[in-house]
Amino acid sequence: MLYKLSYNLRMALDSILQRPLRSFLTSLGIIFGVGAVIAMMAIGQGAQEEIMEQMNILGANNLIIEPIVEQKEEDLTEDSDKDDGSQRFSPGLTVGDARSFQEIIPVVERVSPEIVLETNFLRNGRKRSGKLVGVSNVFFEHSSFHMEKGQDKFTPDQMQFADQVCVIGAGVKSKFFSQEEPIGKYIKVGRNSLRVVGVATERRFSQANLMDLGVRDYDMDVYAPIETVLLRYKNRNRVSPSDLQAAQMRMGMGGDEPAADPETKNYHQIDRMTVAIADGADMVAVAEIIRRMLERRHNGVIDTEVKIPEELLEQKQKTTDMFNLVLISIAAISLLIGGIGIMNIMFASVMERIKEIGVRLALGATKRDIVLQFLSESVTLSIVGGLLGVAFGVGLSLIIDKFFSVPTVISWFPILLAFVVAFSVGVFFGFFPALKAAKQDPVISLRHD
């Protein structure tokens, strides 16, 4: 039995090597089909892992509240005068809103307000634009923030007295402290120098996913206590002398007011707020409660937006699944075409080798031996195509990951699946030509030229 198997394999390899170009062209469908399967599963698994990691950052039970700078108004009473040209006053998103959520809504576990200011970082003659983010210690907890070194949160005294301290991202460390220990050193952020008390670990995300989910590039941020930012940098909830002076300049000393700078329209004290909800709570219902609370607290002005990250991630998962379905369809069509190509070539091979079949049958070979001979050839052709398809799929996955910023994860399962599929295609589409070869009449076959 082993002798017959090895003989059939040698015959199959000899036949493939005698016509290498024809064998390669026949296997193209298998190559592309197997490659598409591996690339599709690598992209799908990479997207799944990235979504899970993003879920850890955003939190499965978190709500995100963001201000709307271009505010919309909504009348709460039917007898409201809509034509008086007046605009309701709204204090915007404030720290007071954050306190009210935690005090009034029982299922709210914690609230993390953030203030994001565009500024410049300066140290040792090196300058770079970036974001100063005012946060509370809750931020480091709900966002699964991990520290590479230094403090894992701000001390109560640093928060209470608005100390000039900060935690820097891994990108800021590599730019300004590449060859020295940053802890205890100062970096100038805007108009103030802040002492570094902690360094966050690096996080890697594609820019497209960061924008889709509204997540900043944490690695290039500098984090300071929210009290420090409100006291020493900017509190949009207060009118300062500099604000009055800027307003007078915009008025042109009594003339017509020019178009306002978009930045001046942002009257919100808080730029982003993350609300952690207890497990088991209805996220949609809580989001609606928060929307109504904000509407009442802001005098009916719709100037905030409540987002549910889980819904964003579910939508992204649906998009990924649709993309995978398209790739599966392409792979299935390629494998079908490859199988049909193998069957056609094997039928042609049977017609070319009728005399050889007659000789073997005359020398005592059984019909089973003939079936195994041609079946071995088709399976070998499929497996060779599968091997080339694996190389193609792995290479394609690496190219997609490196040049298109789409995360891919290559595992053994799709490679094993590729071999199973290639073997199955070879057996299925090679069986009918092999059966035709076995049914040849030895006498007629020997007379065939």
Image (tube, rainbow, N blue to C red):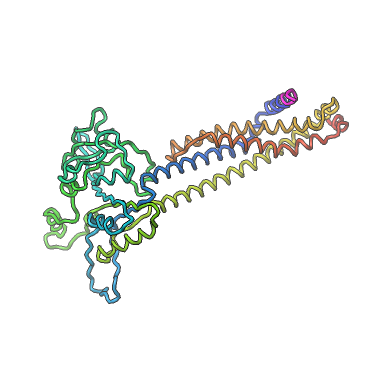
- Residue at the right extreme? 443
Residue drawn 22% across the image and 41% down it: 154
Residue 85 at x, y percent in the picture = 23, 71
Residue 17 at x, y percent in the picture = 67, 26
The residue lying toward the viewer, choosing from 302 and 256, is 302
Q: Is residue 193 magenta?
A: no
Magenta highlight: main SS: helix
Q: Is residue 363 above or below residue 94?
A: above
Q: To which quarter of the image does residue 236 belong?
A: bottom left
Residue 220 at x, y percent in the picture = 29, 40
Residue 351 at x, y percent in the picture = 78, 34
The stretch of residues the image draws in magenta is 1-6
Left or right: residue 413 versus residue 197 is: right
Q: Is residue 107 above or below residue 40?
A: below
Left or right: residue 374 versus residue 334 is: right
Residue drawn 37% across the image and 48% down it: 59
Residue drawn 35% across the image and 58% down it: 287
Evaluate whether residue 163 shows in this view. yes
Q: Is residue 255 above or below residue 146?
A: below
- Quadrant, the C terminus: top right
Evaluate whether residue 208 shows in this view. no
The residue lying toward the viewer, choosing from 75 and 19, is 75
Left or right: residue 253 versus residue 344 is: left
- Residue at the bottom extreme? 79
Q: To which quarter of the image does residue 328 belong?
A: top right
- Residue at the top extreme? 3
Q: How many numbered circles does the render carry? A: 0
The residue lying toward the viewer, choosing from 62 and 210, is 62
- Quadrant, the N terminus: top right
Q: To which quarter of the image does residue 406 belong?
A: top left
Q: Is residue 2 magenta?
A: yes
